[in-house]
Amino acid sequence: MGDSLTSRDSEQHICNEGGSILLHLVVVMIIVGLIGVAMVSLMSTSLVQQVFSDQSQQADLLSESGFRYLTTRYKTAPNEIAKNISLKNIHGQTYILTGNDGRFDLTVAPYFYMVRSDHPAGATRLSGEFPGVKPDSFSIPTSGILGVLSGTRYTLYSYSALSGNDQAFQFQNIIDTSDLSPGLNTALATGRTVNPVLTCETRVLSSGTGNRLRVTGATSIMPSADGVFDIITHGGEFKDSNGTRTGIYVYKTRVGDILYDISVYKNPAAVFSLSLTPATRIAVHRSALIESTGTVNAGTELETNRRFSAMTALGDTVVTVSATDLIYDNPNNVLVDLIDGADVLGDSDTVTPGKVGAAMSFDGDMDYIRLADDPTLDLTSAGSIGAWIKVTAFDNNFAGIIRKGGLANDSDLAYSLEFRAGRRLRLTIHSTTSSLSLDSSATLTAGIWYHVAGTWGPAGMFIYIDGQEDNHRPDTLVVRNTTGTVQIGAQLDELFNPAQKNYGFHGILDEVFIYATQEDLCGIRDIFSNPCNTGCDALAYYPFNGNFQDNAGEDKLGDRAKDASGTGPSLSSDRFACSNQAVQFQWWQILEIGSESPFDFTGSFTVSAWVQVGAWSWLLGDDSFVAKGTDSFRLQRYNNTNNGNFGTTGFSRVDTRGSDNLNDGNWHHLVGVYDGSRKTLYVDGVRDAFDNVSGNLHLNNSRVRMGTLSFLSIYTFQIDDVGFWDRDLSSDEVTHIFNGLRTDPSLP
């Protein structure tokens, strides 16, 4: 077992990728793609030689493969800032095949700005740059309007002076146009997107061939063809004077200040009609001219060059996601194998941060995800459906979360989790002859994350909210099989009426699941409370849910070590009485983590564990729960007391001793945090002790061990949910772990 670490990044997508994929060459290139230097050596194989028999064809394919390579790097960047920085790093690079069999050179010319350095709230100057090179036709105005997008709303800033050059410039005298207050209203980090904002003429913009829009200043800022823009007229939102959703648009050509042949982005056949008020503002959307030049026989008389050039949209909003980012990533979730074929309707592929990574945002106005009928979606005798939800507004009494059946007459309805009047949840199931419904006892509040679930089966019908049973009824029925579609974020796949549309959900959905089994309280609680079911920022996390595996995506397995009797620690019931969800240690049993060096912490770190003491040892008195040998860090008993201890070797204070009694038969949550100058011990979500310290943590070659550090330590205890972070968790984060609430995407 090696010490190398992997990371799980949410894949996000570049849009409008034209051309075919050269499979053989792309595989070779992607495997060896490294971006940190100006020239990267790529592998050459006999396969490459077989593919290219013609110089021109080889140069063509190299140029297109360069574009595909850039696309792959952009996709795997985890967020908006990382994507912008990846474009900046890729620009101007040369990628060469070993043996000089060919190369491609990449150029990125973006039609938007990137923040060049961190800026605090209140700053009246904003440094900018292009994440690449300034497009030839682009002229940075000496005064104007800038847009910074958060969620579905732009904050607009004016500036009245410009300094610098084409690559490093500064917008001066920044003013928030909403209240005319000077300076930024929030801090902006390096890499954030800044959109140029222009004004367009007053008119009704309607769909149809030949439509046009005059935009003041378009000549100097907007691409001459295939440009993308937002219409932002209502307090920074995408709405016109009548409150109609404007969305995102593309145009085919620009002649002077006039944009021609305008259509809805990603849905060119959509019908629209927008009433634009005087001086309506538009934001030049994230797009870039990408050029990849393929070259063979460089520097010889046989040198051949071919250029692949494409104007590419870089996303619907600040971040774009695919439907795969919406679902709970677990093999039991039937959506795992179906979601790639889902249709994303409206503009529901826009996102704000979710409970785990990216999540989809729905505005209740025909935004939803649709899946075609599939046999795995026919949940007859048992089923469980649910999601993390955050309601923006309860403006639809019948908003759908998950529903199988898209017709307004319910003729294809099988099951549904939705809202009813009074902000209550309703679970509904239909048989061939009848239906049953169950409403939640609790009412929900806008702006708060909730984990909601509905189940049915032999035990009856249940609604769970935040890992707790909210309501149930003892009866059930066999759900009928239908050919209905599944809607996520709405009830219907058709318009019900102009007012209610398709009963859309207005808010954010994340971690959606559909199980073909009835999950009990333990199963629902596991989905709700485990911070690393789908990824977290923990270095390692061991929930012990039926195994000893690291669940943080880092693959540091626990080795099931043996004691003198030939058996190791066994799985046991956890603090919620859920079986096989914790580990029982008897006497000198141990569990070790195979990877050693990742736990040699040189900076801040956190160790967390739930423990229940059975009986202390009677001889040594320093019984250990989690430790990296005897001379690094450890969560343990302090000497012969009933108190906890955050022990460290190398710091000026070795023991940070608590005062809470751990030997009372109850489960307790222990967390040790080192923030660079202070050690803190938390017990049950509350600070129990702390010490200001100096020095450096001692590093050793010992594996992290749960259980005894000495053959003479004979004690019994249970342990669960052991986590390690190579950063210091805040007191709020520790409290959230204790309470089982995932208010941060990386934590419960």
Image: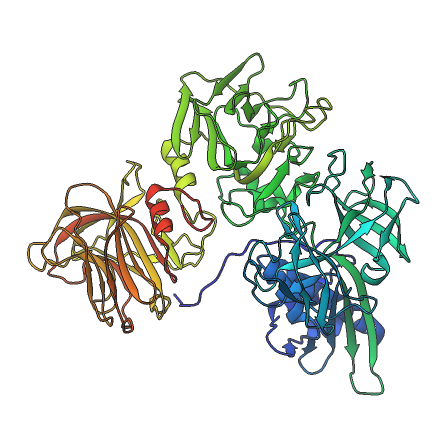
Answer with left or right where residue 355 lies relative to residue 103.
left
Question: Which residue ends up furthest to the top in the rendered image?
Answer: 433
Answer with left or right where residue 681 lies relative to residue 286.
left
Tell me, yes or no, if residue 624 can be seen here: no
- Above or below for 222 versus 420: below
Q: Split into 4 quadrants, where in the image is the N terminus?
A: bottom left
In the image, residue 562 lies at what x, y percent?
23, 57
Using the rendered view, name the quadrant where residue 479 is placed.
Answer: top right
Using the rendered view, name the quadrant where residue 741 is placed.
Answer: top left
Q: Split into 4 quadrants, where in the image is the C terminus?
A: top left
- Above or below for 38 versus 568: below
Question: Which residue ends up furthest to the left in the rendered image?
Answer: 619
Question: Which residue ends up furthest to the bottom in the rendered image?
Answer: 300
In the image, residue 577 lies at what x, y percent?
28, 36
Answer with left or right where residue 17 lies relative to residue 412.
right
Using the rendered view, name the quadrant where residue 676 is placed.
Answer: bottom left
Residue 186 or residue 47, whichever sits in front: 186
Residue 407 or residue 368, whichever sits in front: 368
Q: How many marks?
A: 0
In the image, residue 505 lies at what x, y percent?
60, 32
In the image, residue 415 lies at what x, y percent?
56, 24
Q: Which colour style is shown?
A: rainbow
Tell me, yes or no, if residue 122 can be seen here: yes
Residue drawn at point x = 70 percent, y = 22 percent:
496
